[in-house]
Amino acid sequence: MQKYEKLEKIGEGTYGTVFKAKNRESGEIVALKRVRLDDDDEGVPSSALREICLLKELKHKNIVALYDVLHSERKLTLVFEHCDQDLKKYFDSLNGEIDSDVVKALMYQLLRGLHYCHSHNILHRDLKPQNLLINKTGELKLADFGLARAFGIPVRCYSAEVVTLWYRPPDVLFGAKLYTPSIDMWSSGCIFAELANAGRPLFPGSDVDDQLKRVFKLLGTPTEDTWPGMCSLPDFKPFPLYQPSLSLSQVVPKLSTRGRDLLQKLLICNPSGRMSAIDAMNHLYFTDLNPAVKA
Ligand code: AMP
């Protein structure tokens, strides 16, 4: 730890406190995340350490780089690349207006980061605006990748705040235990709508029931025909049979027809029908993406 000088606290996350710090040798600014474990006395589980060390190999411009893993006195500190701010704070600075080209550029980068991780068999499982980091140059980077597998899917933040359900897909809300990249694709759809609406969340549910009700009211309640196996999920319970709302145009009025088509394909209740990251990147919505972003 002597290698780093702590500068200031920058956030409280799901797994612990995040500090801005400086590498004393190189002068480089980094973000230190001190991971709190449920039972610090037990030390860091070796399975978690193995998982975390694998994440050091994930290197991509849309993923927050993990430079180092410091393990001492049964504590774990992760040293990450530092970014300017997170998407939630960015939304707060927008005053309800966002340029449609910015929405497109951020969404493309989110999908590209997801595709890279999914193609390396790493899932996020807790994507939300707070762990999408952005730099002044408009670069977007995904943070906290792979941590859910190392430490368990978060239920509470370490500060005892309940983790948000807003970005969780219906299969996970019904207790599905089989985790596939489709989980992150649902979250990316929710974030896409939130981007298009300059920070207004799409499904701000207050609990699991309310969350599912909001989803089904917009998309229609799935049935065994549209989603075979749904009724056998561990926490399944029947909901009123809502018909899908006529169109997404009222929900995301500023999004183009192509954008709405992409959104519709990400927000599919049956996880096996949800679009993948690579297919989403190749969607017609991105035809006129700024070539500098694609490069
Ligand atoms: P997290 O545990 O990733 O949700 O982090 C909590 C908060 O700390 C985030 O919402 C960010 O505002 C901030 N943060 C996390 N990682 C970084 C980083 N690498 N660079 C800058 N800020 C970060």
Image (cartoon, rainbow, N blue to C red):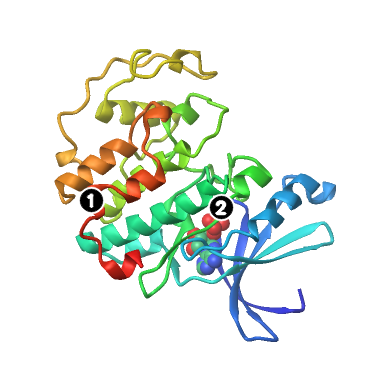
Q: Earlier in the sequence, mark 2 or mark 1?
A: 2
Q: Residue at x 34, y 51 (%)?
A: 281
Q: Quadrant of residue 260?
A: top left
In front: 188, or 253? 188
Which element type, helix, strand or loop, lies under badge 1? helix
Residue 245 is labelled as: none
The residue that label 2 is drawn on is: 145
Left or right, 8 with respect to 61, comes to right
Q: Is residue 182 above or below residue 224?
A: below
Label 1 crowd bin: few (<14), some (14–19), many (20+), radius 10 Å = some
Q: Is residue 191 above or below residue 153?
A: below
How much space separates mark 2 and mark 1, taking CA atoms? 26 Å
Left or right, 102 with respect to 278, comes to left
Q: Amino acid at mark 2?
A: Phe
Left or right, 276 with respect to 54, comes to left
Q: Is residue 33 visible?
A: yes
Residue 285 is labelled as: 1
- Rendered location of residue 11, percent (x, y): 54, 63
